[in-house]
Amino acid sequence: MLPKGRGTLLVTGASASVKGYANSSSFAMGKFGLRGLCQSLARELQPKGIHVAHFVIDGGIAGPNYADAARGPDAFLDPDAIARSYLDIHRQHRSAWSWEIELRPWVETF
């Protein structure tokens, strides 16, 4: 990417990268570190034409083992919707790059 002066690096984080939870300190430590790495890389590589973005995935991702009728059909993130968000960030015009985006099901509390 550096020789071409363009490219995109998209990194998946979790809500633990922005807030700690009881009994999850080792997970939070890794995710906080990953977020810091992405923030630093975004500032380092943006002037070189490389877009770095960190995604906070704040919720479960829907799949065949995530049927939860009690929580409703929108209780989990749809994998295709997540993929569209990644593609949208990749396609952002360089005059308006995002370095971080949070994705959560609309029923998830902040």
Image (spheres, grey):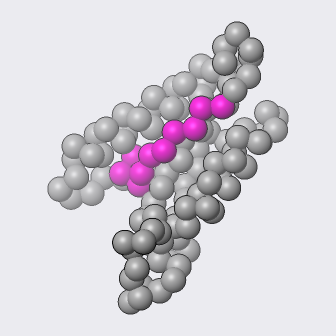
In the figure, is residue 26 to the left or right of 76? Answer: left
Residue extending furthest front? 64
Closer-to-camera residue (44/67): 67
In the figure, is residue 42 to the left or right of 96? Answer: left
Q: Residue at x 81, y 38 (%)?
A: 93
- Whether 83 is drawn above or below 108: the answer is above
Res 89 seen here: yes
Question: Would you identify the image quadrant in which residue 8 lies?
Answer: top right
- Whether 39 is drawn above or below 90: the answer is above
Say if the magenta span includes residue 11.
Answer: yes
Count of all numbered marks drawn on residues in the image: 0
Residue extending furthest top? 3
**Quadrant of the snapshot with the N terminus:** top right
In the figure, is residue 75 to the left or right of 46? Answer: left
Closer-to-camera residue (44/63): 63
- Whether 23 is drawn above or below 78: the answer is above
Res 18 seen here: no
Q: Identify the main secondary structure in magenta.
A: strand
Q: Residue at x 58, y 44 (%)?
A: 100
Say if the magenta span includes residue 16.
Answer: yes
Find the magenta span and give its range.
Answer: 8-17
Instruction: Tell me where residue 80 appears, x and y as whole percent.
Output: 61, 61
Closer-to-camera residue (6/58): 6
Instruction: Tell me where residue 44 appears, x and y as whole percent.
Output: 59, 19
Question: Would you identify the image quadrant in which residue 54 lies?
Answer: top right
Q: Residue at x 42, y 72 (%)?
A: 64
Residue extending furthest bottom? 70
Question: Would you identify the image quadrant in which residue 85 lies?
Answer: bottom right
Instruction: Tell me where residue 97 appears, x and y as whole percent.
Output: 72, 38
Q: Residue at x 59, y 50 (%)?
A: 101
In the figure, is residue 13 to the left or right of 8? Answer: left
